Image: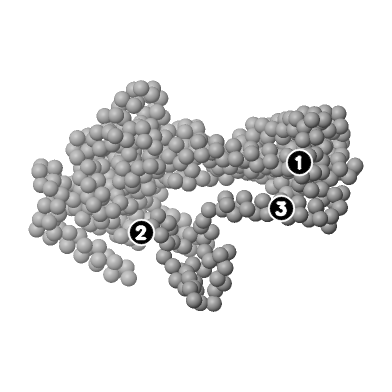
Amino acid sequence: MTMKADNAIPGAPRGALLRNVFRQAPTKPGQTYGVPGEGNTIRISVAAVLSVLALWQIVTASGLIAPLFLPSPVAVAEKFFALVQNGYTNAPLLQHILVSAARVFAAFALACVIGIPLGLGMGMSPTLRGLFDPFLEFYRPIPPLAYLPLMIIWFGIGETSKILLIFLSVLAPVALGARAGVRSVAIEQIHAAYSLGATRSQVLREVVLPSAFPEILTAMRIGVGFGWTTLVAAEMVAATQGLGYMVLSASQFLQTSTVLVGIILIGGIAWIFDLAMRWVEKRLVPWKGRM
Amino acid sequence: MLEIRRASVLYPGRDGADPVEALRSIELDIEPGEFVVALGASGCGKSTLLNLIAGFLAPSSGQIRLDGAPVTGPGQDRAVVFQKHALMPWMNVIDNLSFGLKLQGVEKAERHRIAREFLELLGLEDFETSPVYMLSGGMQQRVGIGRALTADPRILLMDEPLGALDALTRERAQELILRIWEAQKKSVFLITHSVEEALFMGTKLIVMSPRPGRITHRFDLPFSRQHLSGMSGREVKASPDFIAMRETVLSIIFADEEKAA
């Protein structure tokens, strides 16, 4: 009988899934002993996604679930190509994507332009922090759907209320991230600058701002995610274009495959943008976490 | 010349406790070109003393004057070298070195020219454009020292600058600092809790004692000059005079500890 006794604790599960958790044997050269969750995940992730797709296909093809509730992956893919060719309602699919992206990114840009200076100011000045903190912390956990009616009453059913709704959902994480970034500066760095003759404004510009930069980038990444989350809510009222509109109106006509195409597109665009932001992060702040 | 006259620091006691006397009536002169080392167990107030000179902390009573003018805050005439180098990781070596000059509005080409003169002195010629987070701890600390030097201070304040380095790197850095001190003719105030480092580097040693923080002993030291006039660092540290002095100072510090315990 061959057993990998060197890798196991007596009584511990012997499955591959838990082997690393209970590992006691030494590592190979070049690895670090005892790092929780160590190991590559790409192969597992790809396998998991393919398995779910296969399971999805099997279940739908066998007729266990009616297409109304869950169309097959093939049907969703066919729907996607049909939408690319014919568009949805009055506009091509690309148009819906661009309209939604424009809303999210306009709101995101506005939230950065206002939220980053606001957060930095709150980090640096107790007056600004005292002034804005209660409002920011109060509205931050409220779901955008709850104040959507107010947005419509105040700003109408046009683009303004849609972009403002997304803007509000992005503003809080961006501002709070920038504020936290100010805290990430080491006091020795500030002292060093002063002892080299820096003025207060030079310390802010030359030391605090660059120190806060990595956290600001992370906050932007999290913020734009919130923007995509809010998109469907923003396109609930009086929209005739956009991915959120497409998902909502298709659901009213029980076009489940179109709903799924919209969901996958929103998720995919947000994911690709997140990857891009991570790449930018690596290029712009290579020192992050290294000093 | 830096003069400290009857400087005391009282920290307010917490929750109605008695105030803590961090420093009591410190008298200290640092002459131009002098290398003053403060030695003492933790809690003796040596860092507080450095913060007073740097201008980060105002004395509760007494005075600190540099060339006759009272010290009212931090400034480029008293550049500080920190234990944790405190470099700016978003800048490369030459930009960190010339950071003080940038703050003073010196244009880029000129400040890089000045900083380059220090690269060789610091043994960093090959690392001019390296990012500082890629350097070893010893090299980062050399950049920190060079950054203080390029600001051309009247007095260099060093807050346990070598405390985080391994033994070999530390001895090399001690010798480097002495060579720089000789070449630049700066006054230096250095804090350490290594007796050997204090004796080897200083021309004047103050031994400090806690509760209340005060200067209990003062010594004039010959060892740094011996090293600079040709003896190797190890020869100096192994000489009978050095060993005798080390035992004297150690017995003072241990006696202090026992009194406190």
Residue B43's label in the rendered image is 2
Q: Residue sitting at 37 percent across and 51 percent down?
A: B48
Q: A85 above or below B162?
A: above
What residue is shown with label 3? Answer: A54
Q: Residue sitting at 10 percent across and 43 percent down?
A: B230
Eye-nearest disc, 2 or 1:
1
Q: Residues within 10 Å of mark 1 (few under 14, many from 20)?
A: some
Q: Chain of mark 1?
A: A
Marks 2/1 in contact by CB < 8 Å: the verdict is: no
Q: Residues within 10 Å of mark 2 (few under 14, many from 20)?
A: some
Eye-nearest disc, 3 or 2:
3
Q: Chain of mark 3?
A: A
Quarter occupied by the N terminus of chain B: top left
- Where residue A282 appears, as percent x and y from the top left, is 51, 39
Label 1 secondary element: helix
Is A158 on the left-hand or right-hand side of B228? right
Hey, what amino acid is under mark 2?
Gly
Asked whether the viewer can see residue A151, the reply is no
Hey, what amino acid is under mark 3?
Ala
Give B200 or A155, whichever is nearer the viewer.
Answer: A155
Q: Residue sitting at 23 percent across and 42 percent down?
A: B177
Mark 3 and mark 1 lie on one chain; the one further toward the N terminus is 3
Is B22 on the left-hand or right-hand side of A3? left
Q: B238 above or below B204?
A: below
Residue A77's label in the rendered image is 1
Residue A112's label in the rendered image is none
Label 3 secondary element: helix
Q: Residue sitting at 75 percent across and 33 percent down?
A: A97
